[in-house]
Amino acid sequence: MSETLEKYLPLVHRVVNRVAKGMPAHVPREDLISFGTLGLISAMERFQPEKGVKFETFATWRIRGAVLDGIREMDWVPRQVRQWAKEIERAYAAVETHKAESASDQEVADWLGISVQEFHRRMAQVSLGSVASLEEAFHPAGDDAGYHDLLPDPTAEDPSVRLTREELREVLEQAINRLPEKEKLVIALYYYEELSIKEIAEILEVTSARISQLHSKAICRLRGALSRRRQDLKL
């Protein structure tokens, strides 16, 4: 086991580097590596090769999930800000349900019952303290397995409520295509080109804070779309 652990420790560092890109500098990297290592050990203990998933793929999701769970337990984001983030996600999900295009700031603010100025203030706080990411969207709190392999489980009591890989990809693709152009560009540069917030800010010639806000708004929209889809499956 120790040899396997040593072999895949570089994977832990790669995952931590990826997750840490969108986090404040004061979050200790050593803690993130510790969380990730625990995730790797969990992957080694729970890996089932008969499912046809490569170990590295399985381990990557377990490591990400462990890091994100560890961040939640650190609770360095004020509870009020976390609550605002959840409310904003629900607002985007509700407003965009019956729209072919993305919801405007005014529409989301109206749904929340606040002014546009207050919405911008809350969104700024969410972006400053946010660890929200597409990775976290795949590993919701309280879901031990997360979406690490997205494969149908024949032993599940109600497989109809679980998103399949194809459904998840379709929901995300539709939601991304509906993003405003600036948010879509930030998502493309951050997740596909793997540029940092600072690098994207330099390319677009705006502040890092502005890019963080665009990223957080896009993630709130995407997480809202995923949440709405999960709710539809449960109805």
Image: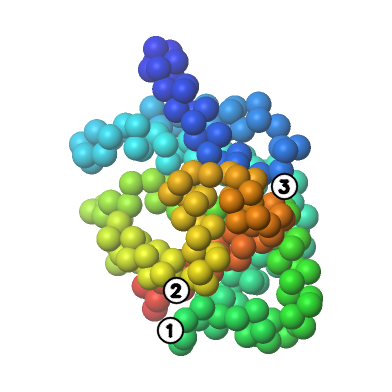
Question: Circle 1 sits on which residue?
Answer: 100
Q: Secondary structure at mark 1?
A: loop
Q: Which mark is residue 219?
A: none
Q: Amino acid at mark 2?
A: Arg
Picture quarter with the N terminus: top left
The image shows residue 9 at horizontal and vertical percentages of 47, 22
Within 10 Å of the Cα at label 1, are there few (<14), some (14-19), or many (20+) other Cα atoms? few
CB under 8 Å between callouts 1 and 2? yes
Q: From this view, report whether residue 140 is shown above or below residue 23.
A: below
Can you identify the residue that label 2 sits on?
Answer: 178
Residue at 74% of width from left, 63% of height from top?
A: 124
Horizontal side of residue 151 vs 19, given as left or right: left
Comparing 192 with 147, the one in front is: 192
Q: Position of residue 101 (x, y in %)?
A: 47, 81
Quarter residue 216 falls in: bottom right
Can residue 41 be seen in this snapshot?
no
Q: How is the image coloured?
A: rainbow
Residue toward you, 153 or 91: 91
Residue labelled with disc 3: 75
Question: Residue at (39%, 12%) from the top-left corner?
Answer: 3
Examine the rendered structure and indicate whether residue 18 appears above or below residue 110. above
Ranked by sequence position, the earlier of labels 1 and 3 is 3
- In terms of image quadrants, where is residue 35? top right
The vertical placement of 193 against 180, above or below, is above
